[in-house]
Image: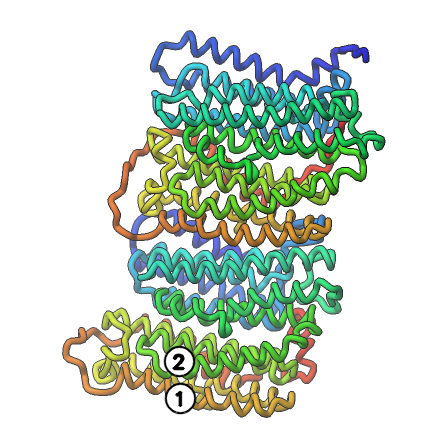
Amino acid sequence: MLVLLLILVPIVAGLVMLMLRGENPVAFKAAGAIVAAATFAGALLVQSGGSECSFRWLSRPFESAFHFGATGVSIWLVLLLTVCTFCAVLATNVSRTRAFVAQLLLLEGTMLGLFLARDLLVFALFWDLMLLPVFFVLIGWGRHHSTAWRFFIYNFAGGLTLLLATAAFGVLYGSTDVIGREGVHLIGSWVPWIFAGFAFAFLVKTPVWPLHTWMPLTYADTPAPMVAVVSAVQSKAGLYGLIVIGMAFMPDYLRDATMLLVALGVISLLYGAFTALVQTDSKRVVAYSSLSHLGLILIAIVSFNPVALQGAVIYMVGHGLFSAALFLILGYVESREETRSLTRLGGLGAQNPRLAGALCIAALAALGLPGLAGFVGEIVILTGVFQAGWVWVVIVALIPIVLASAYMLRLYQGIMNGPEIADLPVRADLSWIEGFAVAPLVLALVLIGVNPHALTTFDPTLYSVAVATQGAGR
Amino acid sequence: MNITVTGADWNALAPLTIVAVTALVVLLADLLSPKNANRYVAIGIALAGVIAAAVDCAGAYGHDYAAFGGAFIVGGFSVVFQEIILICAVGSIVLYGTTGKAAQIPGAIALMLWSTCGAMLMAGAGSLMTIFLGLELLSLALYCLCGLSDRRTAREAAFKYLILSSTASGFLLYGMALLFGASGSVALADLVSPALASNPLLWVGGGMFLIGIAFKLSLVPFHTWSPDVYEGAPLPVTAFMSVATKAATLAVFARFIYAALPAGVDRRLLLPVWIVAAISMIAGNVGMLAQRDLKRLIAYSGIAQVGYILTALAGGTPLGLRYAIYYIAAYTFMNLGAFAVASLLSDDAEQGSTLANYRGLGHRRPVAAALMTFFLLAMAGLPPTAGFLGKILILSTSVDAGYAWLGGVLIVGTAISLYPYAKVIFAMYARDGHAHPHDVRPVAPLAWISAVACFVLVLLMTFYPLTPSNVLPLVR
């Protein structure tokens, strides 16, 4: 029952908040933060105790149930999501706070539903649902209508192929209540198509070159608190799906597609890094860096190496933490200076030491400084991929890691260093509540950085751990 | 053939009788009430009658009975369709409470009840004659209803509907005549005989019959009338037409293909129907792209939705029929809900259906906009609505029955349809500071209740997929 509450509480709270009237930013932020903190506490309980619940949904044409429970991978994404949402709610500083916080909570609830779903049909349901809050925020708060459309068309196209693949999976296997179950293997002439349907949805959502063109626009146009959650957690939905669905049920077809996926991953890795190097919009720098980092995780997953897979899980969490922190801090910068263009900004560090410090830590985590979570993820992934025998991939993957230092330092320097610019508004430094909003992310980055064992057991048979259920596998 | 008519036969007709008599009472009440008064008395009587009929009708579920020598068949199948039609009647009559005084012409509600009666007859029709009788009763009342408004477009719609629908009836009737020629009987049961499978009369007659049906279902290429007629007709009539005529015609179609075709004929004779359904799914959704009026949008959406329903029927499996019925029920509620919200936006219901009226609605009237958003999501087949589950069920049954290509077309059609539905949602929530056109808030408790009830039902149907098992159509 706990898992069900975990999903329903933010959704109900978000809907109630949408229906309320009045605009009291402090009250609604506080209410949202309390709900988010409660879900974080609930997620911790699920992580320590485990919890499952199941209600029959369909019995024909295939069996399906509202079956919720955490798996070995998803529990970390759930914890990441609840932390990020809490931080994002605290950092909210946009107009119409009530509606925005409500959408953040809806996003949290629908994504919790996705990660906790143990049934493919429920997974597909929440997949579509989690796109709606982002769409509504792009409509209500975005600057360009075309961005909302591009997000909508790409992602719902993915959602539809996912739906068709789910229906075909259900008919073929007779049940969709399969996530986290062992020994489910699909065979048949249809399966490549089913795999392709799932893979398309996952690659769009991640995103992977060449399906990424919605992503920089969306990330730039969405207000910082929401894009922090989207980039930190929603982008992991595709990778998570690739592990628990693609790898678990259709490993042979995933292997067949390895060359293609590795090629796409390497291209994303390089293309993202080189593009991030020349962006002038600070949010787009981080957006393209995400494309690059997620390409690395994709390579790790398709390498089928247990160590690389461990690294993928660590890096998914680590990337979530530092990209959320980066976006939140860039949101602070934007709300202070009313621009996020690197050509306009400069010299903020002198007047805003706390802001500069926060950005510095997040940027260092992103470029893979040892001692922070990003480094652990990268090194474990590279080790695993090397073990898998893909020496050239490792060598190529080192290039963007070097480039990451370049574009992250460029980002930091462009905003914080240099002479102070006279016509930029001078605002107060980071307030304690803004600092408090990024503190959990930084803390988690350090904790995982120095003690990655908290996340994994480095079990050589991790491949099964990844898809085994919470409790059973650990 | 001698038919002895017993009390049980009349009993089978009881729901229809109740509706027909209610219509007479409503007509009388209309005559007695002063001019320009509100029609709440008439609406109340009509609702009471329809609900009584629905209760009476529900009693027949599970008691299969072929009345009047098989001309009218009561049972799970007809009960389910009749209930859908009656629900649609309730939803449409409720909308009369919000239309402007000018649109409340005496007799309109009575006509709608008679139309309902015809649709119910079609749902239970077991012979060619009863099908035609029901269809004409349904259509004749609708011709009048379409024209019952002072607007020029309404008269144009009525005329267009009369001409085109009569043409379709002509096809249907001619097809029936040929079918009669083949089997020597008007009973659908007599068409099943295997000896007829090679009779060219059956093929030609069946083909013309199906053309007539496709016309009534507004499938491509016989769809051009529906957007114009929907746009011109008064809002409650459009709501009624968009569901009740489709449900009744689908009942006839389903009974025809499930129970009245000799083995070996169905697959080949019906292939063109599935192709037409596939084209409808694409063309209907493409047609939505350019619409500026909610009624036209829903007309095009309806063309595509019928395609989805036919996809479920394509395999000819019992499960497919159950899912088709599930989808029709879901479609009923989402359509009625959308029309109820439209009628809440303006005193004059016609204003409420222009899409310009929806601009900024999310900021002016958040609850109405949220309801509309929900119904549009349901039509688009997105969660958490019955439209989502309906599509999943239809997809899986089409894959299962070997019609995966129709499932693929359904996905493509849905992908196209996302844009026009989302465009309306977009207009409601975008902040583009346009002047708010016509912000009228009619007091319409009935329409509110109807919209909220539809919302609850569409939501609940997602989690409790009611697919009655006892619904195989019978001919005897």
Q: Amino acid at mark 2?
A: Thr
Q: In the orientation shown, which residue stands out farthest toward the left?
A: A422
Residue ranking furthest to the front: B200
Which residue does the numbered mark 2 point to in the structure image?
A275
Tag count: 2
**Residue at coordinates 33% horizontally, 29% vertically from top-left?**
B347
Vertical order, B289 against B63 (above or below)? below
Labelled disc at residue A282: none
Image depth: mark 1 or mark 2 in front: 2
Tell me residue B159's x, y (percent): 45, 23
Specify few, some or many for label 2: CA neighbours under 10 Å numbering under 14, 14-19, or 20 or more: some
Residue drawn at x 42%, y 29% is B235
Res. A44 visible in picture: no
Q: Is residue B463 above or below residue A310?
A: above
Q: Quadrant of the C terminus of chain A?
A: bottom right
Q: On the picture, is A191 further left or further right than A99? A: right
Q: Which residue in the protein does label 1 denote? A: A405
Q: Nearer the viewer, residue B415 or B440?
A: B415
Instruction: Name which residue type carries label 1.
Output: Ser
Is residue A327 among what the camera can see?
yes
> Horizontally, is A265 left or right of B174 in the view?
left
Identify the residue at the far right of this view: B195
The numbered mark, 1 or 2, whose residue comes first in the sequence reads 2
Residue sitting at 76 percent across and 33 percent down?
Answer: B261
Q: Find residue A130 and report its horizontal and vertical position in percent.
A: 49, 59
Local secondary structure at mark 1? helix
Rendered image quadrant of residue B10 = top right
Q: Nearer the viewer, residue A132 or B325?
A: B325
- Kindly indicate whether the residues beneath marks 1 and 2 are on one polypeptide chain: yes
Q: Locate residue B74 relative to residue A38 in the image: left or right.
A: right
The way the protein has been coloured in the rendering is rainbow
The residue located at (60%, 32%) in the rendering is B247
